[in-house]
Amino acid sequence: MERGPAIDKNWEALKRLLAMLVGMAELGLGGLGAGGQFTFFRQEGRSSPDVAQAEKSKLSPALNAALSLPRHLYRAILKLLRPAESAARRLIIAAARGIVVTLPPFRQRKPKPAIRRGPRAFMPVGPKKRPKPALRASSLSLLDPLKNPLRVRRRYVPAHALPRIRSLADDSPYRPLPASPSPDDPINASRLVLRLEALAAALDDLPGQARRFARWRARHDAALARDREARTAVAQNQQPREAVRFRRISPLRRGRPPGGRLSRYDPTAIHPRNVREVDEILAHAHALAVYALETPDTS
């Protein structure tokens, strides 16, 4: 794994930022009540999967319902958590430069069985018992979420600001306007806690996450090569045409990184006042990831 001083510097900065976010969450959650303090970092003498398994078991449904943060604190953590996740994702991509992965031979999917016909085709079948899924630790996504080009942002008026138009002949009882949202309203923070846990696990095991991305990229390149071969065979009338499957071209999203306020990294530029430290970390990590994707190490 190629891990230089630039990656280490941003990695240390993200660890400090994550520690601050964990402190803010624990302050708002009050130490998770009777469940004790949530542990986001690896403990001495325990491996990362063991810690993730133990922490995942703490998040029971009853505890998830009790995890709530005030609205202002929830939004403050979320504004910093999203760019921190994007920066960690780009550091993983930059660290994966130079990792060579050997994939097992590709196995073709078995064709679906033909529809049964006859009197036994419509006989009732008893319910099949599905095995319970194994407990899986939350992991940081290696791919940027894509924008929906068909999404239309609709402008709306909140309920507390709607006009109260009443008819003179209306005898219905008067209903007061709903209260406007308060900064102290409680919001369920169970998903936020899981995202913090996934970010901590990714930063704690950067080499493992880099190998994980190298495996994804190897599988992705092999799938693109099979698609090119299939299109060539279709053009030469060697096999029937199949449904076109769309695949991602790059793990990164076009344009500005998700959650960032800087479009590019320039250490000599004078940034506006609304640019935060996490924005500079994200812009630098984005430049490292783009360089790693465009110039792979073939030595």
Image (spheres, helix red, strand yellow):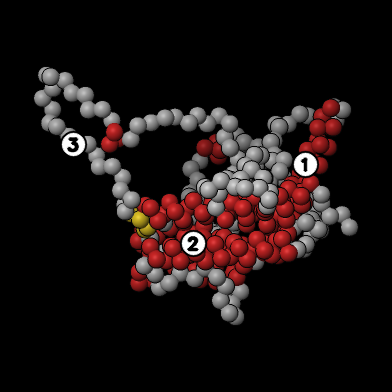
Q: The disc labelled 1 sits on which kind of residue?
A: Leu
Secondary structure at numbered mark 2: helix
The residue tagged 3 is 176
Q: Is residue 112 left or right of residue 235?
A: left
Secondary structure at numbered mark 3: loop
**Which comes sooner in the sequence, label 1 or label 3?**
3
Q: Which residue is found at the position 61% from the left and 74% from the top?
A: 47
Disc 2 from disc 3: Cα separation: 39 Å
Comparing labels 1 and 3, the label whose residue is closer to the camera = 3
| Residue 250 horizontal/vertical position (percent) | 71, 43
Q: How many marks?
A: 3
Query: Quadrant of the image for the C terminus?
Result: bottom right
Disc 1 from disc 2: Cα separation: 39 Å
| Residue 284 horizontal/vertical position (percent) | 67, 53
**Which comes sooner in the sequence, label 2 or label 3?**
2
Q: Which residue is found at the position 77% from the left and 52% from the top?
A: 292
Q: Is residue 154 left or right of residue 236?
A: left
Q: Quadrant of residue 117?
A: top right
Camera-side residue of 133 and 189: 189
The residue positioned farthest toward the right in the image shown: 299
Residue 15 vertical position relative to residue 237 in the rendered view, above or below: below
| Residue 153 horizontal/vertical position (percent) | 48, 31
Tag of residue 21: 2
Q: Quadrant of residue 206?
A: bottom right
Camera-side residue of 183 and 194: 183
| Residue 24 horizontal/vertical position (percent) | 44, 63
Disc 1 from disc 3: Cα separation: 59 Å
Q: The disc labelled 2 sits on which kind of residue?
A: Leu
Residue 191 visible, this orientation: no
Tag of residue 260: none
The residue tagged 1 is 224
